[in-house]
Image (cartoon, grey):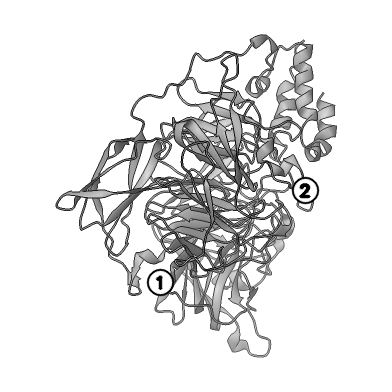
Amino acid sequence: MKFQWASGLLLGTVAVDAFMPPEFSYESSDADRVDAAKEVSGRVRYQSPPADSELIPKTNSENATMNWQVECSSRFQGYECHYAIDDRADRYWQSNPHEDEPSWIVIDLRKEYHVPGLTMLPRLHEAAGQIGEHRISISRDKNTWTEVAYGTWGSNKSPKMSAFDPKPARYVKLLAESESLPDRTQNRTGQIAVVNLAVYAYNEGSFPPEQPSTGVWGPTIDLPIVPVSSAVDQHGDIILWSAWADDQFFASPGGKTLTTTMNRDGILTQSEIFETKHDMFCPGTSMDIDGNIVVSGGADSGRTSVYNGTAWVKGPSMKIPRGYHASTTLSDGRIFVIGGSWSGGDKVEKNAEVYYPGEDARWETRPGAKVEPMMTDDRLGAWRADNHGWLFGWKKASVFQAGPSVEMHWFDVDYRNGNGRPIGAIYNAGPRGNDKDSMSGSAVMYDATQGKILTFGGQRHYDGSYGSKNAYLITLGTEYQPPVVEVAGKGANGTDKGGMNYERVFHTSAILPDGKVFIAGGQSWGKPFHEGEIQFTPEMYDPETDTFTALSANNIKRVYHSISMLLPDATVLNGGGGLCGNCSANHYDAQIFSPPYLFTDGKRAIRPKIQRADAKVTVGQTITFTADSDIKSASLVRVGSTTHTVNTDQRRVPLAINPTGRHGYSATLPSDAGILLPGWYMLFAMNDQGVPSEASMVKVELASAPAYLLDAYAEDQGGKHPSFESLTEDEYECDEDDFKGIISVIVASSSKFWKAWKSVLISQA
């Protein structure tokens, strides 16, 4: 029988099963928010305000000399500067700039405060006049200005906010470099309009000044989306994305993703990825053999999208729809995924499957690589218990699972059954010391040559339990053999208690070129979209001294749905959080942290420069590079891809360098592709003070083409259910058994999804 409604039915099944917190509205930032358009108090309902701060009153009834004053670059006739601060919704300031002249407005607060942020209300009912690219500066005397934020606000129907670290100031300047148009392009000669401006004051008195010896936080980067996922591409640019909307993931219609890309010069560009018909919220993300970024599942739980360095292209449909799953690259360039019951149904085991890249890319199931042994004892069952595994590709296409379950495991990806079919297998690798299940904790491979993994933080249940200080060192050796597990953080003499300085869950991390591990954000009690018990002080793990050291604090909450990524200039981008629609935990921003190694005696260090380096290298062969000065050490750091505290694509491979002439160096690369996975890396060179260069991008290739069995075992097509891709066509010829299979997938879906969409699906059927 023929079902022409299959497309609509399955779109609902695959795309909209993203969990929606019941206390939040379905409205996105593009909804007509009539109340918000009239709200001139300065408060922004659906973004996270600066921590420990309150809005500054604009007028003083007892002393008029303390009333705010403003001046502006220009004004259109009848739209005065002071309309931007008069707390009236019926009038606004509109600029009238000359060609190539930016628009700006300066607020005189009349006295000095520690200023941590501002809000701006545009004309929400009009597409024209919205500020896009902008810069925010503050001053104590109106002569010397300090930039505290920059970036691009999105063209949507929401008030705008910029939160930054508190600094003393009397004057605040908002400079508009462009008008943001509805199609996300920027008009640099357009007029801009502001209905209301408001400024925050920090409640806690002074904020600690910069201490370069413990790192420095840069200005806030305002973004047009809430960045929940990210990946560094082959050019060194960082791609950030949210979901189908810029501010929420639930109620997804499917079929698109909003992204923002920041290139190595810091320039932001916006895109709506619709070519692959994929809502890429909370997917698995890994690089394949060619260094392509492969994004699988997520909100559109059966889809695959591939970024090849220039464009997004549609990949093959997954065999098992999934989201919140784990993904890792194998030593031969394939990709292994497992888990992910959050999306695509939680009543069917989300056992492993393997992605085979190439012209005829495909997914193959591995039913013997079971997910059940690696599940935690989460109170919500499989829907959460198989989420965000800590996977590491290792030797001979093996995979090591370090957590978050306390029991660790090995996966034999290509183990064959008696018929010669690769079905995979799982072997127990023992407990992670005396740790507990550590949902939403982190694990990083900071020294792949020695098989060194650091795990830290997490909570017993995904939602609503206490974070942990626990940290462990795991040393891998031969594949499938139990690793060595030790408590991390016991100090050089081994007598300290061990663990981090702070309990953390929903924190993020990044491996640094020198092997240290940067850890930021999180909270001591974890609940999605809850912004209490925040850890504002980051810390850094030093494997040479086995210590965790506190770094410079910031004042922006980074918890659930936040990210950290090592950038090619050896800094760390830390941003995001929220994506919960009408909630107060949304963060349309990021900051860049400069680690202590970028400073000498309190000033910016003179950095070595890589003048030439091999663009492509082969596993087991030699890499060469030339610098402008003497180099003491070097490392390759695989570019990262992250979401929800997990970034196991990143790994560091230290290089034993040999001088080859004046400032020339070479190093022999590891001969095992399980250590040096194929794909794109950042080559860093460090001088004798440990100051790193900016990175050169290097592609690592295998010594020979992998023996993918393209003519491998073919499944009996007679009993095979149609793929999700085929079921979303307008028509599909299916028999009664196929139809029963379709319905079984729907019924097996998450109970929350079924309750929410039961009436819609039945009416469609």
| Amino acid on which disc 1 is placed | Pro
| x and y percentages locating residue 523 in the rendered image | 64, 62
Q: Which element carries disc 1, helix, strand or loop?
A: helix
| x and y percentages locating residue 659 in the rendered image | 19, 50
Q: Point out which mark residue 212 bears.
A: 1
Using the rendered image of the protein, determine whether residue 277 is visible from the camera's viewpoint: no
Q: Which residue is painted at 67% across and 90% down in the image? A: 62
Q: Point out which mark residue 472 bears.
A: none
Relative to 308, is 33 on the left or the right?
right
Tell me: residue 305, above or below residue 187: above
Looking at the image, which is closer to me, 5 or 685? 685
| Amino acid on which disc 2 is placed | Arg
| x and y percentages locating residue 132 in the rendered image | 51, 55
Which residue in the protein does label 2 denote? 379
Q: Which element carries disc 2, helix, strand or loop?
A: loop
Location of residue 762 (image quadrant): top right
Name the quadrant of the N terminus. Answer: top right
For disc 2, the neighbor class at 10 Å (few under 14, some 14 to 19, many from 20) is some
Relative to 412, is 381 on the left or the right?
right
Looking at the image, which is closer to me, 5 or 565? 565
- Looking at the image, is mark 1 or mark 2 nearer the viewer? 2
Tell me: residue 158, above or below residue 425: below
Q: Which residue is painted at 62% across and 58% down in the image? A: 559
Looking at the image, which is closer to me, 294 or 672? 672
Using the rendered image of the protein, determine whether residue 645 is visible from the camera's viewpoint: yes
Location of residue 353 (image quadrant): top right
Q: Which residue is painted at 66% across and 64% down in the image? A: 524
Sequence order check: which comes first, mark 1 or mark 2? 1
| x and y percentages locating residue 325 in the rendered image | 62, 39
